[in-house]
Amino acid sequence: MPKLIPDSRPQRVLVASNLIYTMGSGLHLTAGVLYFTQAVRLPAEQVGLGLGIAGLVAPPAVRLALRHQQARQVVADQSAKGRCPARLRRRAAIVSATGTTIQQR
């Protein structure tokens, strides 16, 4: 049988934080289902379908958002350094004017 508690302190801290995170996630999901079925009075089928669709849509949406944010950051960095073509500098200015924070170095 494998040891459940590691020997070194950093490994024990990692195991404890993982346990706390896992328990918190489980409680959050359970509380969400109870809220939607008891307080909002949605049928369990609708709640299950909604959570299932969210689980399918979330990973690609996160990847797309991260890719878009990274591309915008590269344009902003290059624009700040003056190495970016004019059309991309205009796009960076538009993005900046719409309230999106762009860090300049």
Image (spheres, rainbow, N blue to C red):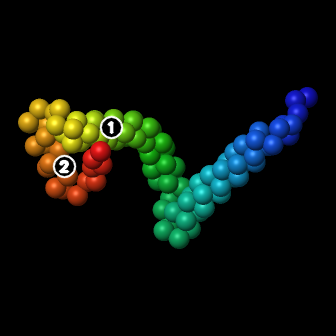
Q: Is residue 29 visible?
A: yes
Query: Which of disc 1 and disc 2 is earlier in sequence?
Result: 1
Q: Is residue 4 visible?
A: no
Residue 89, horizontal then vertical, whole percent: 13, 40
- Residue at 17% x, 44% y: name it: 92
99 w.r.t. 52: above or below: below
99 w.r.t. 15: above or below: below
Quadrant of the frame with the C terminus = top left
How far is the residue under mark 2 from the one under mark 1?
A: 13 Å
Q: Residues within 10 Å of mark 1 (few under 14, many from 20)?
A: few
- Residue at 86% x, 40% y: name it: 5
The residue carrying mark 1 is 70
Q: What kind of residue is marked 2? A: Val
Which secondary structure lies at badge 2? helix
- Residue at 48% x, 42% y: name it: 55
Residue 68, horizontal then vertical, whole percent: 29, 38
Residue 53, horizontal then vertical, whole percent: 43, 43
Compared across the picture, whether 62 is left or right of 44 comes to: left
The residue carrying mark 2 is 95
**Residue lying furthest bottom:** 39
Q: Nearer the viewer, residue 75 or 105?
A: 105
Q: Residues within 10 Å of mark 2 (few under 14, many from 20)?
A: some
Q: What kind of residue is marked 1? A: Gln
Q: Which mark is residue 27?
A: none
Which secondary structure lies at badge 1? helix
Q: Nearer the viewer, residue 33 or 88?
A: 88
- Residue at 21% x, 42% y: name it: 80
Residue 24, horizontal then vertical, whole percent: 65, 55
Q: How many marks?
A: 2
